[in-house]
Amino acid sequence: MGFILPIIPVITVLLLFLTRKSFLQHIINLLASGLLVIGALLLTYKVVNEGSIRYGFLGGIFYVDALSVIVLDIVIIIGLVTSIYSVGYLQEEIRQEKIRPGQIKRYYLLMYSFIFTMVMALTVNNLGLMWIAIEATTLASAFLVGFDNNKYALEAAWKYVIICSVGIAIAFLGIILFYLSARGVLSESAALDWVALYENAKSLQSPVLRLAFIFILVGFGTKAGLAPMHTWLPDAHSQAPSPISALLSGVLLNSAMYGIIRALTIVNCNLENNIFTGRLLLAIGILSILTAAIFIMTQRDYKRLLAYSSIEHMGIIAVAMGVFTPLAVFGGLLHMINHSLTKSMLFLSAGNILQKFNTMQISKIKGVLKILPFSGTAFLLGLFAIAGTPPFSIFSSEINIIVALFSGGSIWIGVVLVLLLAVVFAGIVASLFRMFYGEREQETLQPGEINKVGTGAIVVLLIAITLGGLFMPSYVIELIYQAQGLILGI
Amino acid sequence: MLEFVKILSILILLSAFVLMGNKRINSYIETFRAQSLLIALMAGINGIIMLKTEGRFDLLAVCVLILVLKVIYIPGLLHRTYAHVKYEVEKDFILNIPILISVCSALVVFTYFCLRTLSSIIPNSIILQLVNSVSVIWIGLFFMISRKKAIGQIIGFLVIENGLFVTTMLGTEGMPFIVDLGLFIDLITAILIMGILVFRINDQFDSIDTDQLNKLKG
């Protein structure tokens, strides 16, 4: 089987250009995301059995290994769920006359360009090309963020484009420095190839590499939503259409984090310890969790609250990568998967709530459980899951990371992390739980789900995150072990 | 030939200072055009050297791309965008122009001290040129935060991109061609998207003052 994953979204975009009927566009959307999942599963199977794969054509720029496959699978699985959800979501938006039927085409075109850029970012072996693909993710999703075309959405889109483009420009400076550090060690064509960089990591110039890592951390960290570069994230996540918020939060942040992990691997191998990168990542990670905790405590808008929770979880992953022991890296990778599934489920059920109640203000919503029995329950359980309550999967990865912190000697950081997680839990309970009970004063809303198929997808995700907390399929563990080996260099 | 490159790198830095002192949006765009022309010249000279020594056309192709995109197309696009929105002299700076220029000078000095650590791997003469180009990046960033109009921010982004490009050219003797090409495709899409957003912001807010984008907080 050749390398078909980046080709499917391209063909989808071309087909979408040719179709006029919205019915056909929905069908193409579902088929494409289904095909992507099949392709990704075949590829995962191959990687689990054979290790990394390099494809010969186009100068050998396509390369996948266990680490990229983990993030790629997240992209494609969340892509499938959102594409199923989007069908009902868009139909409801048309029914409520928020969008015109002609806008469906634009939505899907942008969504598949967005997926294409992310698949590209995860399947190339060249830092420069990965940078281009990650910059392209911003561009492809800018109009998705501003899709509603009102004052709020435009403000969010403008901030998103400007802050992320500048951030990513700074990452490019880091990549130039990476290239400089390989001067005289690698040939010109191989100097941005991270397989080659990793193999020759010990002979790269350490001072330049340190400088490069700082720039890359700031640059890709902007895209990953790490504080203090996170300011675009709550705006973009709250103003984008809900399925797009699910994609942004569950998928885009991970792709950027993947860029940081790639650079981290090379730098740690070169310096032969993780003191330098560990300090930076721990500081930036704890700062992100702290920022998120403060804003979650005082939040009045439930989609923004979920966005801040994404910042918190990216911070947790950064802390895990900063600790850099086998247990922490394992926990970090697992956390990536768990956070994506849980957070996209939450954004999708928040989408149902938003379409039913037509407000993002927490104080104006009461009695969700009565009016939306399924997505309301999923939202409630999802909130417990995202706050780290057992038996959900986020608990298992968080406990891994916390144990790694305590056993790795960073006891105080562990204490701070646990305290902050408690604050976040309290914040979520205090701000959001009043949505679920109580009677609305004016009984205008009829109980009942609006997006039935989409709600089905939400329930499937809920089952996945519940089972994921209780047991892990052996091939997922095998995949994470392989990726852990790649990151730690063992 | 190398003397020309040195002079050009200083001129590019100077053009960034000139940009900082500009008040009218139309003059920003023209200064940006001039800066891009200087960069195209630099790419051309380096390209000829590369063609002579290694027989590669990469940089010459990049030079043509810069001429078409950054000297002709993007400034034209920005002028057209600006013609549709209200014409006004930018007067509400956060700081006044002399202070802005002093801060820019401080940025150059700061860059010089940062880049001295590179002296183990790069010859000193190139480091001085790198100081010029990296300073352009910081000045671009500073320009973005010192201007309040949306077009000013686009120009700042373009100047950052220019600085990055010169840094790449001087520091690495050109990235692999595919990277350069991708960079340009990204750049042109970014500018198109920002341009469209400026139109829409102008429609919705009746102004392109980014101070009005303050609805989303907390």
Image (cartoon, coloured by chain):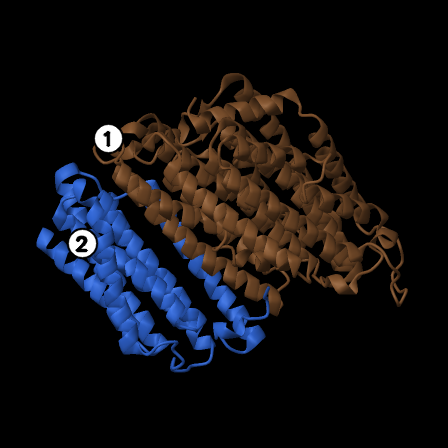
Which amino acid is tagged 1? Val
Q: Which mark is residue A19?
A: none
Which chain is brown in the picture? A
- Pick whichever, A418 or B103, lies toward us: A418
Q: Are marks 2 and 1 on the same chain?
A: no
Give coordinates of residue B23: x percent, y percent: 33, 78
- Mark 1 lies on residue: A185
- Pick whichever, B73 or B176, lies toward us: B176
- Pick whichever, A419 or A272, lies toward us: A419
Letter of the chain that mark 2 sits on in the rendering: B
Image quadrant in which the N terminus of chain A is located: top right
Letter of the chain that mark 1 sits on in the rendering: A
Give coordinates of residue B16: x percent, y percent: 26, 66
Q: Secondary structure at mark 2?
A: helix
Q: Is residue A298 visible?
A: yes
Residue drawn at x 27%, y 67% is B104
Residue drawn at x 66%, y 45% is A343
Which amino acid is tagged 2? Gln
Give coordinates of residue A308: x percent, y percent: 60, 53
- Mark 2 lies on residue: B129
* Badge 2 density bin: few <14, some 14–19, many ≥20, Cα 10 Å: many
Q: Is residue A339 above or below residue A349?
A: above
Q: CA distance from mark 2 to mark 1?
A: 23 Å
Q: Hue of chain B?
A: blue
Classify residue A387 as left or right of residue B202: right
Classify residue A144 as left or right of residue B40: right
Q: Quadrant of residue B151?
A: bottom left
Q: Is residue A258 above or below residue B163?
A: above
Q: Is residue A241 above or below residue A189?
A: below
Give the number of callouts: 2
Give coordinates of residue A273: x percent, y percent: 37, 31
* Badge 1 density bin: few <14, some 14–19, many ≥20, Cα 10 Å: some
